[in-house]
Image (spheres, helix red, strand yellow):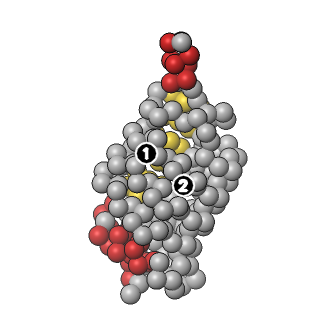
């Protein structure tokens, strides 16, 4: 029985490659987050896939994650609370998706965050939903699109190209 336990502990999701606490599922033509990501995972790369939505609770068992890369997918929305258990997360990449807004409190529990990438999304600034994001990025400006990614001004409203931070 112990052998089976060890095997399941180091299992790697199909179509991903795993090394230590890193799971790389990037550019694998995935339509959703794969099942079977080890709970010990600290770095999860899911960029450059065709993920259109995240299931509620999809990351809840991955409480050790420090790095979550969801860039270059086709995410159109985020479920309420999808990042709430990821209190150790330092890097969150949501750039190059189809996000129009984020739910109220989407980033509230991410107390360890040092980098968040939000550029190249069609943020809908006509909708009052945008105010949570606007206020959050103003309060956390130093960690938004840091180091060469355009900073807080590079979170742009769809159509007008004005920065989300300037929305009133």
For the point 57% across and 65% down, the residue is 77
Q: Which residue is mark 1?
A: 67
Number of other residues with Cα within 10 Å of mark 2, as a class: few under 14, some 14 to 19, many 20 or more: few
Lateral position of residue 62 relative to residue 46, left or right: left
Quadrant for the C terminus in the image: bottom left
Can you say whether 136 is above or below 70 in the image?
A: below
Image quarter of residue 14: top right
Q: Which residue is mark 2?
A: 56
Label 2: which secondary element:
loop
Taking the image as drawn, is residue 14 in sight? yes
The x, y position of residue 131, in whole percent, is 41, 78
**Label 2 to label 1, Cα distance in Å?**
19 Å
For the point 36% across and 69% down, the residue is 137
Can you say whether 5 is above or below 30 in the image?
A: above
Number of other residues with Cα within 10 Å of mark 1, as a class: few under 14, some 14 to 19, many 20 or more: many
Lateral position of residue 81 relative to residue 26, left or right: left
The x, y position of residue 105, in whole percent, is 39, 66
The x, y position of residue 160, in whole percent, is 53, 85
The x, y position of residue 33, in whole percent, is 60, 46
């Amino acid at each position: 029985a112990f052998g089976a336990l060890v095997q399941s502990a180091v299992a790697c999701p199909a179509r991903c490659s795993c090394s230590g606490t890193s799971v790389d599922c990037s550019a694998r033509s995935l339509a959703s987050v794969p099942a079977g990501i080890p709970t010990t995972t600290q770095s999860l790369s899911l960029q450059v896939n065709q993920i259109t939505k995240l299931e509620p609770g999809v990351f809840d068992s991955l409480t050790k994650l420090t790095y979550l890369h969801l860039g270059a997918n086709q995410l159109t929305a985020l479920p309420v609370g999808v990042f709430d258990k990821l209190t150790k997360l330092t890097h969150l990449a949501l750039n190059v998706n189809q996000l129009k807004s984020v739910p109220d409190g989407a980033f509230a529990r991410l107390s360890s965050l040092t980098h968040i990438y939000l550029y190249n999304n069609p943020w809908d600034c006509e909708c009052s939903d945008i105010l949570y994001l606007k206020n959050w990025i103003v309060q956390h400006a130093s960690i938004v699109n840091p180091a060469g990614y355009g900073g807080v001004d590079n979170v742009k409203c769809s159509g007008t190209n004005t920065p989300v931070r300037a929305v009133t």
